[in-house]
Structures are given as structure tokens and as C-alpha cells.
Image (cartoon, rainbow, N blue to C red):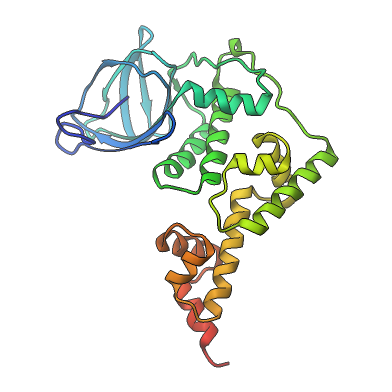
Amino acid sequence: MNGKDPHHPGRGEGDGDWARYWRDPHRPLEAMHAHFVRHVFHLHSHDAYSFAVTESGAQRFRCRGGGHTSSTGMIMAFNPDDPHDGEAAEELGFTYRIMHIGPEVVREVLDDITGGRARMPLFDRPVVDDPVLARALRRLHPALVGGADPLVREERLTAAVTAMVRRNASSRTGSAVPRELSGGGQTVAARRVRALLDEAYERELTAQDLADAAGCSRFALYRAFRGAYGMPPSDYQRLLRLRKARALLAAGSSAADAAALSGFADQAHFHRWFVRSFGVTPGVFGRAAAAPA
């Protein structure tokens, strides 16, 4: 469902309605976070796969000749060109997060996982109740709209597409088995990626940068790295940035300088992750480093 309105860009039409929309400038990826009470979607379709998580309330719609309702925690799944409409099914409306993922993006992810042996998925059920997929979509949405690092976006996109296809796609898709590295190959790939991250953690590295360094697919390197070091590459990159920032704060740098010099996109992002990782703010840590024993 697309909340764009040529007369009211980015907003719905009714009392209490709101919508925030995001588009990737480089590839067919779009996302919306919205709350609708009065807005009614006219019958329409998208040229992308569309997946929405209903956060609160309920919405009803018609798709493929039948009526459906998605309530809190449920997921709507639309294939490209699936006609559907939509409206609130409760007096207080509904809030949801929806992502439109172009077929070429889905194809790229599946080709990386299987070496080009998977066919494009089809989704028979317009509404599914799948907590695992819901969690993957809830993690992907803020990574897209919040300007997360490329590694974070790609890891969460791969996780979401994988969950969509493996757990909910029709068996007609003929999904192939993922390509796996041998034990020795996994070790080598993980070590190569770690060496690159150790050397260039402050840079905006992409999943393909890491795959090139590892000499394998993005999916294979992700599994290898997590198996070897207990965390995905994006978490390890952030950890290195936080360690650098701690050293800078201990040496007397301001929080703003520590954030910039260690590779964080902005101070708010740095502050949030510093607190989540260490339990104190950068300011408290810096002052403690300077305080007498």
C-alpha cells in the first residue's frame, strides 16, 4: 500500500492520519511508516514485492478475490502486480511499517545466497502470522529509513528476504540450497574480513567490499564471520569504532570529535550505541577518565 498523495506529499488525508516515506536513490527500495484512521486506499498494485508489519490496530483489504484482515503483529505480503485496496478495520485505525522491495533486489539477494539457482518467489497468503519474519522486517525498516551503515542495511535486507522466502514463499519457487564454504574456507574468509575491518573500520564498507576481500558470496562470508567471531561484520565494525572512541575520550577528545574520528555518521548515533554498549554516556566516560583516583 502506497501512502503517497500528490496533493499532500507524505501524509494521509483524514483526521489523525500521518505517513513518513523513504526512497533509496540508487535502487528500488522504499519504506513507509504510517497511521491511518480515515484514509481508504483505492484498488492499486506495485511493481515490487511489498511486506508490511501491522504495529497496532487492524486493517482490512481485498486481494486475489478475497477479503483479509491484518491485526497487530501480522504481516501483509504482496507479490508484484497484486491488486489490493485497504482501510482501517477498527475505529482507532492502524499503524504499520511497509517496505517495497524491487524484484531485482530480491533476485540479487537470492542469487548471492544460491549462486543463481533459485527462482523468484511467490507468496500465496496475503496475510501471515510469522513472528520471525515480523522481527526481521521490524529490524530492516529502521535500518533503511534511519541511514544505517551499508553493512547493517545489507545484513538486515538479506535476513529479511531469506526469512520471507524460506518461511512463506510458495513451494513453486523451487528455492535452492545455499552455497556453503568448507570448514577451512570459512576460517580463511572470516580472517580476511576481520583483517579488512581492523584496517578500515572507520570507512563505509559495503557487503560487497567484504565479499571481495573474503573471496566468496556475501551470504557465505556473513555465516563464516558470525560462526568464527560470534557476531555479524556490522557489529564488529561498530565495536571497533566504539573502542577507538573510548580511547579518544580517555585522551581528552570531545564526544563530537570522538564520534567523527572513529567513523560514526553523527553524534546522536554514536551516543546511542555508546550507552547501549557501555551503560554510560560518552560525557560521563570522558569525565571519569579525567577525574583523580
Can I make out residue 281 in this image? no
Vertical placement of residue 193 versus 121, above or below: below
Q: Is residue 250 left or right of residue 70?
A: right
| Residue in the picture at 68% in, 23% down | 115
Of 122 and 148, nearer the camera is 148
| Residue in the picture at 29% in, 16% down | 44
Vertical placement of residue 106 versus 283, above or below: above
> Where in the figure is residue 169, as x and y percent of width and height?
55, 18
> Where in the figure is residue 186, as x and y percent of width and height?
78, 41
For residue 64, what is the image quadrant?
A: top left
> Where in the figure is residue 210, as x and y percent of width and height?
65, 44
Vertical placement of residue 40 versus 219, above or below: above
Quadrant into which the N terminus falls: top left
Vertical placement of residue 172 versus 126, above or below: above
Of 92 and 284, nearer the camera is 284
| Residue in the picture at 47% in, 16% down | 125
Can I make out residue 171 in this image? yes
For residue 28, what is the image quadrant?
A: top left
Quadrant into which the C terminus falls: bottom right
For residue 188, what is the image quadrant?
A: top right
